[in-house]
Amino acid sequence: MRFSRKITIIQVRKPKETDVNKDLQYFGSALGLFGLRDKDKSCYRIFLELLKAAKQKLGLSSDELAYKLSLTRGTVVHHLNKLMDAGIAVNIRNRYYLREENLEIVINEIKKDLASSMDDLATLAKEIDVWMGL
């Protein structure tokens, strides 16, 4: 099944010090998840909760996340949609989960998504070149 996904990769400088919080910030920033407009780091906090839940193999509802993080449900849903569009999270029966059991597998799946998209674009580019006589 094919579906729309927004894959964003931003080259940002990796932190020099080894610190899990800085590494997680780098991870999300490199995927375009944590922008400057997110002043209270809502997306980052939701991402962390999904990671914690993945460790326990649990899903979380938007209401649970809103309550736990003292955010509005609207804010939570906005960021969950962003995480799902990026291929980080999935929604199963109104519960949100990390897409895979750990981040390494998530990134490998995003790599497959990206490779498939690039293959589709290359095929289309070839067809357009032929059509345009290039």
Image (cartoon, rainbow, N blue to C red):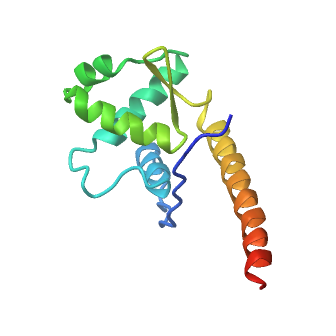
Identify the image quadrant of the N terminus.
Answer: top right
Question: How many numbered marks are there?
Answer: 0
Could you tell me which residue is drawn at 34 percent across and 38 percent down?
79
78 or 9, nearer to the observer: 78
Q: Give residue 15's position: percent from left, percent from top.
A: 47, 60
1 or 35, nearer to the observer: 1
Q: In the image, 76: left or right of 1? A: left
88 or 126, nearer to the observer: 126
Q: Is residue 78 above or below residue 72?
A: below
Q: In the image, 63: left or right of 108? A: left
Could you tell me which residue is drawn at 25 percent across and 24 percent down?
66
Q: Is residue 42 above or below residue 65?
A: below
Identify the image quadrant of the C terminus.
Answer: bottom right
Q: Is residue 59 above or below residue 13?
A: above
Q: Which of the 4 quarters of the picture holds residue 62?
A: top left
4 or 45, nearer to the observer: 4
Q: Give residue 8's position: percent from left, percent from top.
A: 51, 57
Q: Give residue 55's position: percent from left, percent from top.
A: 54, 22
Q: Give residue 17's position: percent from left, percent from top.
A: 47, 57
Could you tell me which residue is drawn at 55 percent across and 53 percent down?
7
Could you tell me which residue is drawn at 52 percent across and 38 percent down?
88
In the picture as drawn, the residue positioned furthest to the bottom comes out as 134
